[in-house]
Image: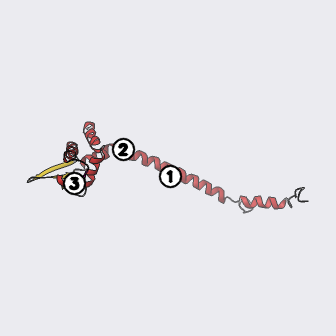
Amino acid sequence: MPEDLDQIWKALADPTRRTILDFLRAGPRPTTDIVEQFPKLSRFAVMKHLDVLRQAALVVTREEGRRRINALNAVPIRQIYERWVSNYEDLWAGTLLRVKESAERTAKARGRRNTTKNAGGKSPTDARERRIEAAGPARTSRRAR
């Protein structure tokens, strides 16, 4: 199976081939329509890209008279997803959940500190202000005298 996936990765590695697959997502298309999507490439070059996609089973082709109709086959992409993405998805989901829980605990702890009341029912900031007021008027500096 890993060898099969190698062909799929190779096919997906090229931006032109990915663009062809994106074009085919809208539905099956004749080869001529695909070639017209790439005016800077020769028909031969587009056909080579289609051959790579066919070998990877990403494109299925049927003949209708003289025309060849190409369709996207998403099964190999699903195989890539199941082999690579879904396995790591659980890992990242667990990690992100732990980060979220840690951030929530930190926020909750900070919230408790900010709302903690001292014995007089005042917040810690109020208690500091009362101590300053109780100390009396502030001394003036020599220059102010």
Of discs 3 and 1, which sits in the foreground?
Answer: 3
State the residue at coordinates (27%, 53%): 22
Where is residue 29? Give x, y as percent.
Answer: 19, 55
Q: Which residue is mark 2?
A: 87
State the residue at coordinates (43%, 49%): 93
Q: Which residues are magenta?
A: 34-39
- Is residue 135 rendered to the left or right of residue 125? right
The three-letter code of the residue at mark 1 reads Lys
Where is residue 127? Give x, y as percent.
Answer: 76, 59
Quarter of the figure that contains the N terminus: top left
Farthest-out residue, bottom: 121
State the residue at coordinates (28%, 37%): 2
Give 124 or 118, whichever is nearer the viewer.
124
Quarter of the figure that contains the C terminus: bottom right
**Can you see residue 45?**
yes
Q: Is residue 81 magenta?
A: no
Mark found first going from the N terminus, 3 or 1: 3
> Which mark, residue 120?
none
Mark found first going from the N terminus, 1 or 2: 2
Q: Residues within 10 Å of mark 2 (few under 14, many from 20)?
A: few
Q: Which residue is mark 3?
A: 36
**Badge 1 vs badge 2, beta-carbon distance below 8 Å:** no
Q: Secondary structure at mark 2?
A: helix
Q: Which residue is mark 1?
A: 100
Q: Quadrant of residue 126?
A: bottom right
Q: Residues within 10 Å of mark 3 (few under 14, many from 20)?
A: few
- Is residue 97 rendered to the left or right of residue 129? left
Q: Secondary structure at mark 1?
A: helix
Q: Quadrant of residue 118?
A: bottom right
